[in-house]
Image: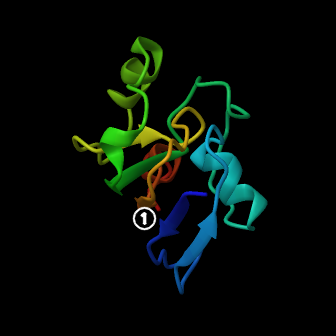
Amino acid sequence: MPQIIFLPHEELCPEGLVIDAESGTTICDAALKQGIEIEHACEKSCACTTCHVHVREGFDSMAEATDLEEDYLDKAWGVDPDSRLSCQARVADEDLVIEIPKYTINMVSENH
């Protein structure tokens, strides 16, 4: 069973966390199941960017992002080449290392 290694995030998981995740599970669902409260304003329907994460290792093991996900990623804050929406990115057969950005687009627009 692949593992997801969540790097430390000041608010959501200060110590970081390593979890086992079934292949086919979204990164968001795996995080939420373990108490990592990744924001998901659109209720995981690929209609916002609040669940944006960086897949620091294992990116190429996942299926490619859909055109819809790519369109939303274009609107996310702090995007880089390993960005994905965690509600859409599914665990495959390799371990993943995930970095949750410090801010979401909601926080940036609210001047946090």
Asked whether residue 12 is in view, the answer is no
Name the foreground residue: 72 vs 16: 16
Outermost residue, left direction? 81
Mark 1: amino acid: Lys
Which residue is labeled 1 in the image? Answer: 102
Q: At 37% across and 22% down in the image, what residue appears? A: 70
Towards the viewer: 52 or 41: 52
Whether residue 84 is visible: yes
Q: Position of residue 6 (x, y in %)?
A: 50, 68
**The N terminus lies in which quarter of the figure?**
bottom right
Residue shown at 38% from the left, 30% from the top: 73
Mark 1 Cα shell of 10 Å, populated few (<14), some (14-19), many (≥20):
few
When the figure is inspected, residue 58 is found, relative to residue 48, above or below; the finding is below
Work out which residue is located at the far bottom of the displayed protein and give it: 15
Asked if 40 appears above or below 57 in the picture, the reply is above
Q: Quadrant of residue 98?
A: bottom left
Residue 74 at x, y percent in the picture: 32, 27
In the rendered structure, the answer to whether residue 99 lies left or right of residue 2 reads: left
10 lies left or right of 60: right
| Residue 30 spot, x, y in % from top left | 68, 54
